[in-house]
Amino acid sequence: MKIKTRRWIWAVASVLAVAALTGGGVYLWTRPVVRVEVRGASHALPGELVRLVDVRVGERLYGLNPERLADRVMRHPWVRTADVLRLPNGVVRIAVEERTPVALVYEGNRPAAYLDAAGYAMPVLRVEPYDVPLVRGRILPANLTQPAPLVPVRDLAASLATLSPDANALVSDLLVDARGDVTLRTVAAPGGDPLRVRLGRGDYDAKFDALVRFWHRAVLTRPTRRFDVVDLRFAGQIVTREAERGTPFPDSLRADSAAVALPSTPPLSSP
């Protein structure tokens, strides 16, 4: 008799457990969205992200595809990564990590966009400007969901993201021409004029390091000398051309494809 009673109790308990699980599952499956919330956004306005995700209150929560929703959120130019969670309480949570500017792009005389380390463009902020190097040239993609089309621009952006404090202190602005060749203008040297430095394309980390060494060994130690061009395009060499006395320094950068004339003094070799 006791055995039959135990079996009956276990049977009833099993039925109740299955019913509870089934009922709970049905409840969660049919749970409606009650709210959409955003976390981690600073420059991307929460309202913009909510509009992009396009989830409405009352929709079936577990009928939503989180990966698809995250992909929508990442169409915002300031969003680097996005994760969308469906919580049992009916909340859809959007968690984002924003892009960090490494350069400010000027087209003509106006700021056009920020650039991040991967070469993606972000809209210029009206407040809280970033203290980053200026890059001049028409280098931005037509579609802001894509990175800059020129490979040298993406390489330059990656290098600017890890620029040493010494190198960053020397950079005034950079110009990128239509082919991707980069020319840099430094801050004013001890003699009063900035230096025009040809970086060319690629290997920017090494070139910035070479510029810092050249500045400390040849510019600061010889303040009366004035360089018309410093050319870092050649591996293992720093080619210079000294300016003639009375020659005005150009008001703006000019990046061209002409070869640098041989300097009047032997080129400095990078150690």
Image: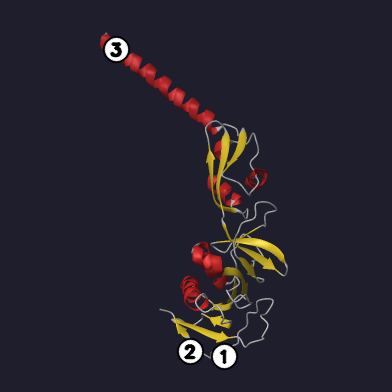
- Crowding at label 1, few (<14), some or many (≥20) Cα neighbours within 10 Å? few
Of the two numbered discs 1 and 3 in the rendering, the one whose residue sits closer to the viewer: 1
Please give the residue where the numbered disc 2 appears in the rendered image: 266
Q: Is residue 169 left or right of residue 127?
A: left
- Crowding at label 3, few (<14), some or many (≥20) Cα neighbours within 10 Å? few
Quadrant of the drawing holding the C terminus:
bottom left
Q: Residue at x 68, y 67 (%)?
A: 106
Q: Nearer the viewer, residue 18 or 160?
A: 160
Residue 181 can be seen, yes or no: no
Q: Residue at x 63, y 79 (%)?
A: 255
Alpha carbon distance from label 1 to label 3: 104 Å
**In this rendering, is residue 246 above or below 192?**
below
In the picture, the disc for residue 93 is none
Quadrant of the drawing holding the N terminus:
top left
Q: Are marks 2 and 3 in contact (CB under 8 Å)?
A: no
Alpha carbon distance from label 2 to label 3: 105 Å
Q: Residue at x 69, y 63 (%)?
A: 112
**In this rendering, is residue 34 above or below 66?**
above
Indicate which disc, 2 or 3, sits on the residue closer to the N terminus.
3
Count of number-bearing discs: 3
Please give the residue where the numbered disc 1 appears in the rendered image: 261
Q: Amino acid at mark 1?
A: Ala
Please give the residue where the numbered disc 3 appears in the rendered image: 4
Q: Is residue 188 left or right of residue 267?
A: right
